[in-house]
Amino acid sequence: MLKSYFLVALRTIRKNPGYAGVNIFGLTLGISAFLVILLVIRFELSFDKFHSDSEKIFRINNELRLSSGNYKYPTSTSALAPALSNQLPEVTDYTRMSGGGQQLVIEVETELYKENNSFFVDPNFLEFFNFSLLQGQKEQVLSAPNTVVLTETAAVRYFGNTNVIGKTLKVKGQQDTNYEVTGLLENLPKNTHIAFDLLFSNQTFRSQNANFLNSWANDGFYNYIKLTDEQHANLVTAKMVELKAANIEEGRLHMFNPDLIALEDIHLKSNLRNEISVNGSMDFVYIFTAVGVFVLLIAGINYMNLATARSAKRAKEVGMRKVLGAYRKQLINQFLGESLVLASISALLSLIMVYLLIGPFSSFINKPLSSAMLFEPEVLGALALIVVVIGLGSGVYPALFLSAFKPVVVLKGKLAAGMGGSGIFRKALVVFQFVISIVMIIGTVIVYNQLSFLQNKPLGFERENILMVSNTNQAITPRMEAFKNELEKNPSIEGVTATFSKPGGLRPIIFVKSESVSEEVDGLNLAGINIYLNYLDVMNIEVQDGRNFDPTIPTDSTEAIIINRRAEAELNLKGEAVGKFIDVQGFGGDWQRKQIIGVIDDINFEPLQRRTESCFYAYFFPNFQEIFIKVNPESQSEVVSYVRDKWTEFAPSQPFEYSFLEEDLAAHYDNEKALSQLVVFFAILAVGIACLGLFGLASYSTEQRIKEVGVRKVLGASIWQVLYLLSKDFAILIAIAFVIAAPVAFYLSGWWLQNFAFSITPSVLTFLLAGFVALFIALLTVSQKTYAAAKSNPVKALRSE
């Protein structure tokens, strides 16, 4: 029986290659898109799950509760994890990382290298986590001071091969330090939030300062703890409150508010300042899960629509089968069998298509997908489920519909083509398809407009043509003025300055006090941006009240400060800040009195996902991480070469590393850029699949009405009148779809845009444009069939009458 159903299904496909081709092609595209999205989502959800007991591992975050708002960080004090381990039996182990984000200069056999991806870690780090150690013993490689473990990539970079055990590298600084290579790690898997190339033993700290690793005063350690059971997280949180009361000074209580986040949640649910690596987002997972399901739905709806639309062509076949004794159940099984065969063929073609294209697509979306992932049991199981769901789900309505024909009626030829009353169900499916398509078109435009807004919004400072040179180990700081003067001799260099905190980068939070702040508020916390005195001039930052820094006034480098409008408001000095004094707490805890000499606008020194914070600019201490060089845009390459030569002259022992500020700022929106590319790709795919079905429907619709067209042409109807007649119904369906899609798209776009402190306001024009695009594409799709029908000879259509 099953063989009979299968052979009949193949025979039907062979007899109707156009119908089968449209269905198979549409289903293949839909299943392929879903498979790719499934691989992406599986990758995003797999982060850090390869570690043993990953569900029992937690990271300790910390929240600073400041006057300007609350700020959560992924780091906390070095003493916290050991204290929890000592006092709670539920905490079975811990490990710590520190030093992330530091720029190191490494020397190997007189060659200098820049390293940005290293950490100091506890000796048990490689036992706590399951990174693959190729050479060395996990329990020994980091147990001694001045030892280091390299990844394969780092080993090849520094030594040219992976035979590195026992070799030495030197970390240059105020005091050069030699480290012995004691272990070699396999390159890290891509699905981990912990990214590094070098691991130094933090026993080096212990040999230099015995108390450093057990201090309650520092807060730059990534603390990970392992519990006996993940349900004990609340118990640990309560214990941290007790430890806070017992160990934190009263003046720092607002700076210490720890909590836990599960290791497996970090990648998708944590996007804090100072994360080890750029994390993903659950919004991304939600959006693309929905896109995958909707694309699959559109493909399935195509089959349902086309199968019911061509009902009359199979009506006599059904009638004959029933006359010859076929039961309705047998007919249903036959039609479901056809649907399953189509779905199976499409699934096989999808597997081949994705296998061939996964490499280029992986590069396009910057995700490490591979063809091997297609053959994982879970993916093959999902593909089999898709075949069943699409085959049965899309085939059940046509099967029930076709098997219900009465043989007496159909054999008398009284059944109209495309039977089903007014075809309301079929029209509803078309509307549903285009609701999804229009929502995706609107979403594409909004994501693109938001990305364009992020990249082009005026930030309040010069970002074009700013060459940034990393001031590694403060190599230039002692000779900053001489270096600046030497560079400015080049006519293509328009200015040179320096800063500790580049826009979009890290900057210290400084505690300040002022008589203008009420007594109930102990003080304020401002972002302190340490700059060279000409910084505002070079960066074209306008001082709106008061004056700029003046190098000829000696006190400007010791006592002067410039604040932004937000700080002015928080200090209760609106309109009268210039000339007032505030007290600023230094890093050593000492207080310095500063005079406000100017006020600037709230420029966007943070990425636009975040609001602008209250801040001040000052020459606070002689420490500059970046040197900014404003260059003539027509001479960029020549200037880079010139600056490199001067750098070698002034800092021969430090490597030259540069980038451009505009590119650096654009990197903050890489996630949004990737989202934009994916949304565009799948929106085009969804619209294409929907139009494929619409084309098939137009074919059967015009065939059904060919005699009506003939009569109208005989009675004098023009080609344009016939075109209007045949296209009107499709246009109405698109209009209904737009009315439903517009509010849905408005809600979803608002949900996504709320993630940004600065965002566009979707315009009515965007929605109308999406509606017109959908209408144009739909009418263009059906035009070939409708125009052919309008141009047809009415004599041929009416000959049988």
Image (cartoon, rainbow, N blue to C red):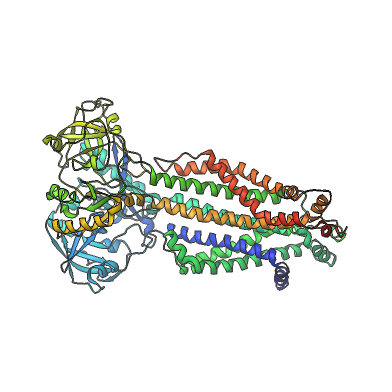
Q: Where, by quadrant of the figure, is residue 359 drawn?
A: bottom left
Quadrant of image for the N terminus: bottom right
Tell me where residue 534 appears, x and y as whole percent: 20, 41
Residue 675 as seen in the image, left or right of residue 425: left
Residue at figure coordinates x 17%, y 34% from the top left: 560
How many labels sit on residues?
0
Residue 542 visible in image = yes
Report the residue at 69% width, 65% height from top: 18
Residue 370 or 185: which is nearer the viewer?
370
Position of residue 16 relative to residue 304, above or below, is: below
Give x and y (percent) for residue 127.
Answer: 29, 64
Q: Is residue 540 above or below residue 698?
A: above
The quarter of the picture where the C terminus appears is bottom right
Q: Residue 736's image quarter?
A: top right
In the foreground, 270 or 743: 743
Image point (64%, 53%), residue name? 780
Q: In the picture provided, is 339 more to the left or to the right than 649? A: right
